[in-house]
Amino acid sequence: QVQLVESGGGLVQPGGSLRLSCAASGFMISIYNIKWYRQAPGKERELVASLTNHGRSADYADFAKGRFAISSDNTKNTAYLQMNSLKPEDTAVYYCNVPRFPLNYWGQGTQVTVSS
């Protein structure tokens, strides 16, 4: 069964760090492009970061540059989003996404709350 399961969210103080995980099952995640999105309450879902297949190159939204890092681990079949210097405006549900034509896989999301 094809599945993406996110984990690693939680409550963190401003300036803190979190590492989100996206565990894939039923397919090899690293051979596809991987994306992380987020959606804050009342806002549209937005792209945070993307990683091309086999981790060849990464791209980030302006708000994520210099603070977030996307990666994948073939041995664990898992993608990651390392988030540093978190700000209250980073509060959102974070989703991993793997476009696998003609399908488009999404995880269930993990809540990140940045608050003192």
Image (cartoon, helix red, strand yellow):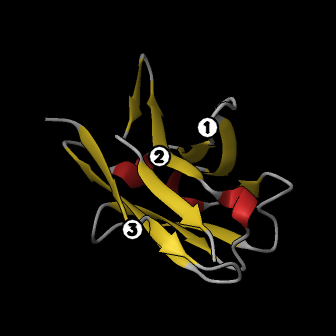
Q: Earlier in the sequence, mark 2 or mark 1?
A: 1
Give the SS element for disc 1: loop
Q: Amino acid at mark 2?
A: Cys
What residue lies at 68% left-to-right and 59% top-to-bottom? Answer: 90
Q: Which numbered disc covers residue 96? A: 2
Closer-to-camera residue (51/110): 110
- Residue 68 lies, in percent from the top left, at 68, 69
Q: Report the mark closest to the observer, 3 or 1.
A: 1
Q: Examine the rendered structure and indicate whether residue 76 appears above or below residue 2.
A: below
- Closer to us: 15 or 25: 15
Q: Quadrant of the C terminus?
A: bottom right
Q: Earlier in the sequence, mark 2 or mark 3?
A: 3
Question: Residue drawn 21% across and 36% down?
Answer: 2
Disc 3 element: loop
**Residue 55 at what x, y percent from top left?**
56, 61
Answer yes or no: is residue 92 visible: yes
Q: CA distance from mark 2 to mark 3?
A: 12 Å
- Badge nearest the viewer, 2 or 3: 3
Count the marks. 3
Quadrant housing the N terminus: top left
**Three-letter amino acid code of the residue under disc 1:** Pro
> From this viewpoint, is residue 57 visible?
no
What residue is shown with label 3? 8
The residue closer to the viewer here, 66 or 56, is 66
Provide residue 73's location: percent of width, then percent of height.
Answer: 39, 70
The amino acid on which the numbered mark 3 sits, given as a three-letter code, is Gly
Q: Residue furthest top?
A: 102
Q: Is residue 93 above or below residue 56?
A: above
Q: Residues within 10 Å of mark 2 (few under 14, many from 20)?
A: many
**Left or right of 33, for residue 6:** left
Q: Going by the image, does 91 lie left or right of 22?
A: right
Question: CA gap, disc 3 to disc 1?
Answer: 19 Å
